[in-house]
Amino acid sequence: MEPWIGFDLDGTLAYESEWQGVEFIGEPIMPTIELLKSYIKNGNKCKIFTARAGQEGAESAIHLWLEKQGLPKLEVTNQKDYGLMFFFDDRAIPVENNTGRTYFQRSTSNVQPSSDKLTMDEKICCNEISRNIMLNGFKGDKLKSCLEYLEKHINFHTDRIYQLPTEQL
């Protein structure tokens, strides 16, 4: 089975708003559009991994939207298979393979109701951090120093986003 990378559409590649039908797709989110383009440019097979797949008119609307973003016609699916290496999604939380342990849990401390929605850059950064944690096995002091670096150098506040349970730090 050929390996592939999945990209969610609504909330990941396109701004998500109130549902307006299958044909309406929000404005592009350029950081993830550029990320998708870079994976394609480097020879990776990519698919649009969306709940819209299978709905009448969805695939043609998605292909038209992709074309407007300078992207090729990609396969549209809502199913995982054994070729899926990883996927980018605004709702996913990674789980450590064969253990059931999540890498992140929502933080309930120091979060004000007005700031509980993440910016797209924060979501992308979370996905990249979680992917690197999975690929590189960051644990203990190595993970803690990585999170401290993010807070210190790019003003990325991990307490606002996701934290590992303290027993894993």
Image (cartoon, rainbow, N blue to C red):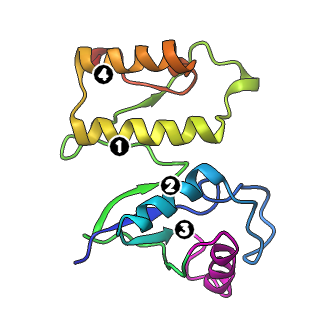
**Viewer-side label of 1, 2:** 2
- In the rendered view, tell whether residue 146 sits above or below residue 39: above
Dot 3 or dot 2, earlier in sequence? 2
Is 55 contained in the magenta span? Answer: yes
Q: Residue at x 55, y 77 (%)?
A: 53
The numbered dot on residue 143 is 4
Helix or strand or loop: what does disc 2 sit on? helix
Q: Amino acid at mark 4?
A: Leu
Type of amino acid under label 2: Leu
The residue range painted magenta reads 50-71
| Helix, strand or loop for disc 4 | helix
Pointer 4: residues within 10 angstroms few (<14), some, or many (20+)?
some
| Labels 1 and 4: the sequence-earlier one | 1
In reply to whether residue 47 is colored magenta, the answer given is no
Q: Amino acid at mark 1?
A: Arg
Real-space Cα separation, disc 3 to disc 2, in angstroms: 17 Å
Q: Nearer the viewer, mark 3 or mark 1?
A: 1
Kindly identify which residue carries mark 3: 50
Q: Residue at x 56, y 82 (%)?
A: 54
